[in-house]
Image (cartoon, rainbow, N blue to C red):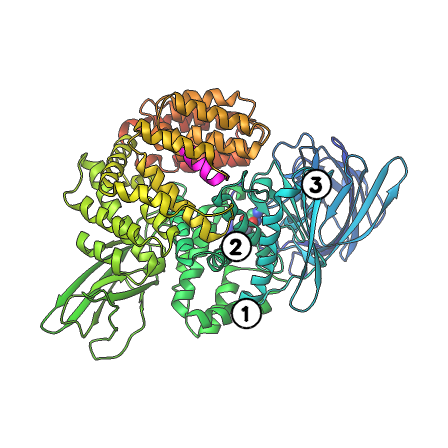
């Protein structure tokens, strides 16, 4: 198929103003009648044929202004409807299609999940329901009538407000939903099923009473309270932080168990992966609670950033996703510890986005070409997209940023906008030229910044020399210098923040905008050498190399006023050690002492913010080290180095670790709040480190904690420790866990994922055996991600087995999954994104596995695209 190019964007020749859908739900033959008010676009090509998108459709009937056209007047194939000479003015087009939800295993369009009819239309699923100009710049007002057998689907939901409902003969009933806000087709949704409802209300700041509903499988009603609370907090926060008020009388959320993504922001009817709705202390971990809070907020925030203001085309995806991720991060930061949230977000950014950007799948935050848009719901578009906005805020300041947001929300309300439209609002609000800043959207790859410092004790000056470089990425060999806002501070020997003055004595703000290939900044008033703390709060998403010594880093770990950089200093110490040890098979002398001292200090002071201490005690992951190494990666060497470092740290901290277990025990019954979660996080990190030698008596303590835990967080954390140490106890604990939760698929996903991540040679066979376990189902995306995704992305040594069996296994699963669900298959395949950095033996085997996928005769566009770019 031909690629889609940003440069070739043009308006649709025919647009649709109103959509009336009449959908008669049936398991295998759902009849869809669409009555569309069509008109030529004033900027379109006059007299152009009407061309609508379809995907796997059969046209059952067609009428133009009520009359059936002659057969030669139109052409309908599975993927297109063409009307050769449509009326020159507005007209009414009636289309009837019949679709089979039961057979829809792609989970795009209208499908069934555990008997519930539901939809997923982003990005291009609406065209699997009816023919339509299925692109985000065609905005229409939708009215949807849904009819079903009442017993099979007592609940019928659509976008917007319910306007009519009633019974019909023969045990049938119907509901009519109307959404007054014009929207693109990707935001259309409907649900029909036998679901339980948990309801509440929210009163907006102008007094609108909104009925809130969360719909789940019967028996799961008691698992919705946290999601409902998160929803209400999101609605309030968006009013306070961004002035965004909800705009319908109803807001519904439906949880389904088969879902390709996390959730979907359909107007007034969000559909969620049940994983991100359902939670009880005994079923969900603190991490699950935090993810539910963040995703509920994310989808809700899309109501303004995505729905009221949508994207002109899919190249602009970051316009809604990057911005909405930024907003949900800020929300969680306000709800929890801001520093810890930032650290967690940067961890995620580095492990997913930096890795993506360093390999063959690297692409700009706003891509300019795609073969399959589903493959661009990436860490780059989402997470780097959010980082750019955070960097913009640092660059222009919080006040100008808020003015720019306000301007954007007013000026573009009701528009299908572009990234240029968005950035123009901030240029206007700040009075700055943001042309260079826009490179963040166009240039792929992670900018690298080298920092060197010079101190002149006689002149009392301190100079910071900065240099930015950009490595080539696919399709971008040469790059221009970007503007990188680097928040910074200078710390005196006493640990106090030094005032910032230029050489001529002017006070300067704590941000350097590095906007050229090189830049030097000199500060005065420093008779003694200060220590530079730079890229505070990770103000720019860059790879930073400084000339800070291990002693400087140890100093920053204690004294930096920026909590993020205190954490970063510790990570850098650990990373430097692990990189050197992985390369040479030996540790750097002295490095461990400074790191261990820094960690001991963090532990001693852990009462201030236990969640922070937990983050500090969590070493960089094996894939973090692999990314730092970049080339000739040997995952076994990394694993060995990391294990050795953990044992070395443990021997230095040992007594403190066991103390922490009692010192930070959470009193009273479980509560998911951030403070209690932070204490549990610290205990569980300490437990893991304390038991890392696998001594029988310690494992017995861990097993007891596992048995006696009164919540899933502690129970699962202890199980994860046990899983690291082979033996009968581990197998017994795994079996008991499985028995206890045998009816709960979401919990068994944790059980699957844990086993897939065991760093032992027997794991691949274990994973293969689990494919046949009743807890697993090839057809369910959550199960696939839990078992196969965790193996491929979360188990560095075993996915990268030196014999290539891990690669061959993933290739097989991808080839088997592709015909059923291309989107999930393509996602699994992207675990190969760093294959070029491997040492030669593994690289050859990884290539062979990719080539096997490439040689498969009937690949989907999704998998074909990923495999071609991975090999390209
Ligand atoms: N549901 C996905 C998200 O909210 C795609 N829009 O990010
Ligand atoms: Zn989103």
Look at 46% across and 69% down and name the residue there: 401
Q: Residue furthest left?
A: 458
* Res. 367 in view: no
**Dot 2 beta carbon under 8 Å from ligand 1:** no
Say which quadrant the N terminus sits in.
Answer: top right
Look at 34% across and 50% down and name the residue there: 613
Determine the secondary structure under disc 1: helix
- Cα distance, mark 1 to mark 2? 20 Å
Judge whether residue 719 is colored magenta. Answer: yes
Q: Which residue is mark 1?
A: 406
Is 503 left or right of 369, judged from the image as shown? left
Q: Which residue is mark 2?
A: 316
Considering only vertical position in the picture, is 228 above or below 621?
Answer: below
Judge whether residue 753 is colored magenta. Answer: no
Residue 651 picture location, percent across and down: 23, 38
**Crowding near pointer 1: few (<14 within 10 Å), some, many (20+)?**
some
- Start and end of the magenta stretch? 711-720
- Comparing 752 with 598, the one in front is 598
**Crowding near pointer 2: few (<14 within 10 Å), some, many (20+)?**
many
Residue 24 picture location, percent across and down: 79, 39
- Cα distance, mark 2 to mark 3? 24 Å
* Res. 738 in view: yes
Residue 171 picture location, percent across and down: 86, 36
Residue 278 picture location, percent across and down: 59, 42
| Count of number-bearing discs | 3
Q: Which residue is mark 3?
A: 129
């Amino acid at each position: 198929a031909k690629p889609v190019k940003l440069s070739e964007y043009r308006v649709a020749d025919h647009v649709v103003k109103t959509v009336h859908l009449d959908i008669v739900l049936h398991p295998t033959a759902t009849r869809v009648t669409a009555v569309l008010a069509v008109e030529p676009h004033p900027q379109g090509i006059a007299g152009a044929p009407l061309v609508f998108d379809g995907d796997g459709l059969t046209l059952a009937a067609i009428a133009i202004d009520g009359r059936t056209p002659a057969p030669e007047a139109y052409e309908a194939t599975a993927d297109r409807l063409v009307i050769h000479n449509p009326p020159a003015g507005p007209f009414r087009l009636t289309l009837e299609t019949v679709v089979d939800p039961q057979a829809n295993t792609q989970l795009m369009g209208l499908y069934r999940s555990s008997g519930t009819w539901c939809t997923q239309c982003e990005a291009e699923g609406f065209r699997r329901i009816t023919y339509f100009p299925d692109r985000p710049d065609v905005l229409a007002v939708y009215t949807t009538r849904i009819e079903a057998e009442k017993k099979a689907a007592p609940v019928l939901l659509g976008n917007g407000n319910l306007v009519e409902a009633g019974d019909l003969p023969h045990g049938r009933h119907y509901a009519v939903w109307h959404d007054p806000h014009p929207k693109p087709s990707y935001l259309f949704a409907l649900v029909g099923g036998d679901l339980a409802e948990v309801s509440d209300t929210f009163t907006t700041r102008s007094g609108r009473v909104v009925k809130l509903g969360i719909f789940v499988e019967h028996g799961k009603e008691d698992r919705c309270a946290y999601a409902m609370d998160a929803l209400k907090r999101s609605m309030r926060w968006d009013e306070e932080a961004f002035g965004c008020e909800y705009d319908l009388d109803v807001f519904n959320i439906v949880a389904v168990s088969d879902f390709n993504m996390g959730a979907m922001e359909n107007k007034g009817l969000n559909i969620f992966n049940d994983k991100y709705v359902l939670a009880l202390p005994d079923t969900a971990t603190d991490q699950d609670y935090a993810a539910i809070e963040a995703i509920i907020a994310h989808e809700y925030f899309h109501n303004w950033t995505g729905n009221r203001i949508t994207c002109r085309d899919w190249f602009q995806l970051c316009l809604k996703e990057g911005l909405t991720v930024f907003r949900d991060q800020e929300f969680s930061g306000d709800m929890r510890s801001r520093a810890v949230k930032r650290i967690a977000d940067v961890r995620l950014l580095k492990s997913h986005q930096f890795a993506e950007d360093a390999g063959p799948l690297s692409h700009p935050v706003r891509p300019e070409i795609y073969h399959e848009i589903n493959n661009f719901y990436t860490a780059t578009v989402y997470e780097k997209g959010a980082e750019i906005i955070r960097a913009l805020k640092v660059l222009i300041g919080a006040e100008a940023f808020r003015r720019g947001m306000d301007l954007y929300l007013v000026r573009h309300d009701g528009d299908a906008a572009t990234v240029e439209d968005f950035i123009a609002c901030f240029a206007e609000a700040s009075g700055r030229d943001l042309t260079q800043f826009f490179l963040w959207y166009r240039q792929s790859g992670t900018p690298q910044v080298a920092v060197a410092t010079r101190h002149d004790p006689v002149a009392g000056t301190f100079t910071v020399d900065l240099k930015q470089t950009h490595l080539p990425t696919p399709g971008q060999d040469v790059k221009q210098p970007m503007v990188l806002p680097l928040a910074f501070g200078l710390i005196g020997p006493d640990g106090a923040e030094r005032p910032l003055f230029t050489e001529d004595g002017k006070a300067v703000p704590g941000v350097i905008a590095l906007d050229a290939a090189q830049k030097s900044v000199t500060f005065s008033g420093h008779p003694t050498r200060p220590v530079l703390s730079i890229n505070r709060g990770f103000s720019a998403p860059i790879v930073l190399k400084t000339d800070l010594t291990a002693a400087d880093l140890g100093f920053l770990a204690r004294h930096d006023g920026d909590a993020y950089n205190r954490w970063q200093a510790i990570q850098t110490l650990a990373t430097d050690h692990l990189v050197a040890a992985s390369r040479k098979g030996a540790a750097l002398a002295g490095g461990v002492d400074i790191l261990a001292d820094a960690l001991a200090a963090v532990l001693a002071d852990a009462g201030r913010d236990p969640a922070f201490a937990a983050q500090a005690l969590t070493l960089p992951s094996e894939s973090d080290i692999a990314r730092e190494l970049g080339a000739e990666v040997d995952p076994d060497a990394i694993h060995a180095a990391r294990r050795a470092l953990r044992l070395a740290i443990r021997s230095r901290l040992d007594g403190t670790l066991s103390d922490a277990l009692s010192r930070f025990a959470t009193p009273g019954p479980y509560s998911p709040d951030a403070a209690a979660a932070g204490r549990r996080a610290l205990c569980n990190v300490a437990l893991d480190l304390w038991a890392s030698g696998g001594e029988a008596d310690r494992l017995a303590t861990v097993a007891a904690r596992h048995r006696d835990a009164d919540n899933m967080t502690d129970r699962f954390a202890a199980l994860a420790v046990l899983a690291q140490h082979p033996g009968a106890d581990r197998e017994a604990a795994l079996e008991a866990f499985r028995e206890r939760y045998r009816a709960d698929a979401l919990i068994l996903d944790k059980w699957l994922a844990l086993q897939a991540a065991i760093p032992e040679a027997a794991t691949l066979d274990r994973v293969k055996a689990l494919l046949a376990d009743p807890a697993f189902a090839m057809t369910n995306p959550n199960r696939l991600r839990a078992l196969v995704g965790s193996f491929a992305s979360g188990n560095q040594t075993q996915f990268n087995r030196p014999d290539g069996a891990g690669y061959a296994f993933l290739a097989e699963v991808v080839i088997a999954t592709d015909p059923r669900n291309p989107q999930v298959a393509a996602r699994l395949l992207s675990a190969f994104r760093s294959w070029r950095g491997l040492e030669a033996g593994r690289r050859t085997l990884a290539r062979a596995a990719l080539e096997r996928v490439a040689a498969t005769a009937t690949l989907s566009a999704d998998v074909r695209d990923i495999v071609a770019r991975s090999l390209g």
